[in-house]
Amino acid sequence: MEKERTKPTVFSTVENWFKSIINDINDRSHVNEEYYHFTAKPDEEAKVEIVQQENSIKQYTTKDISTPLFMHIKEQRQYDYDVTILSAEGKAISSFQKAGIDSRMVYSSNVNNLKYYQPFQGEKILIAANNYKQNKEYVSTINEAAKVLTSKGAITSIVVPSEGEDFNEMLKNKGAIAVKELMIPEIMKLINTQNVKTESEQVVKTDIAPKIGVRR
């Protein structure tokens, strides 16, 4: 007599769905990357130049050093998180790529330039910041960027590494799994955030001072 098949529970369904995401993230054989060269000024729309390249970050130079420089990296996958990871460091983006994080990624050459990024209305942005515990100016700059991007119509959140000062250090010391376990829930929170706010409430986690131990 055949044993009765166990009916799938809500927990097992969610667990299997999460495992399928992890497995797809680990399978990088079908990754094609699109690179976008962003130059933007506060009062102008971003100018975009697209370049295709495989599995590495292409460096750009610009003659106009007063113009913020952005690099946009998007991996074409079987699904799309529809979240932009924004960072002021190329090595942070490299760390996410090495860890297998699948998302739209943009970085600028300077943390002060993040606020000049031109989001589309309702764009969900996760700012990947460094864990600089004593740098009040850095914390203030990150928080300001989140607020400015929100005022431009974005839905903004901030994440900092749980170990070490930056994500590259976290990747080296704790490995790819630790980076995924930190980043994926933050990405999913943004995905599940309803695009209904148009004011400061759109900042999911703006003030990072408490997170990294900075007193004001």
Image (cartoon, helix red, strand yellow):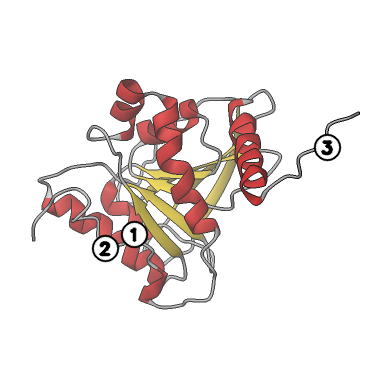
Residue 98 in the image: state x and y as whole percent: 47, 25
Alpha-carbon span between mark 1 and mark 3: 58 Å
Circle 1 packing at 10 Å, graded few (<14), some (14-19), many (20+), is many
Q: Nearer the viewer, residue 4 or 20?
A: 4
Mark 2 or mark 3: name the one nearer the start of the chain. 3
Residue 76 visible (yes or no): no
Q: Amino acid at mark 2?
A: Glu
- Mark closer to the observer (1, 3): 3
In this rendering, is residue 17 above or below 207?
A: above
Give the farthest residue toward the right: 1
On the image, numbered disc 1 is attached to which residue? 115
On the image, numbered disc 3 is attached to which residue? 4
Q: Verify CB contact (< 8 Å) between mark 1 and mark 2.
A: yes
Q: Nearer the viewer, residue 212 or 141?
A: 212
Residue 79 in the image: state x and y as whole percent: 68, 44
Instruction: Give the quarter of the image for residue 24.
Output: top right
Instruction: Give the quarter of the image for residue 87.
Output: top left
**Left-right relation of 115 to 11:** left
Q: Residue at x 35, y 53 (%)?
A: 158
SS at badge 2: helix
Mark 1 or mark 2: name the one nearer the start of the chain. 1
Residue 57 in the image: state x and y as whole percent: 48, 29
Q: Amino acid at mark 1?
A: Lys
On the image, numbered disc 2 is attached to which residue? 144
Q: Amino acid at mark 3?
A: Glu
Viewport quadrant of the N terminus: top right
Q: Residue at x 18, y 56 (%)?
A: 209
Q: Verify CB contact (< 8 Å) between mark 1 and mark 3.
A: no
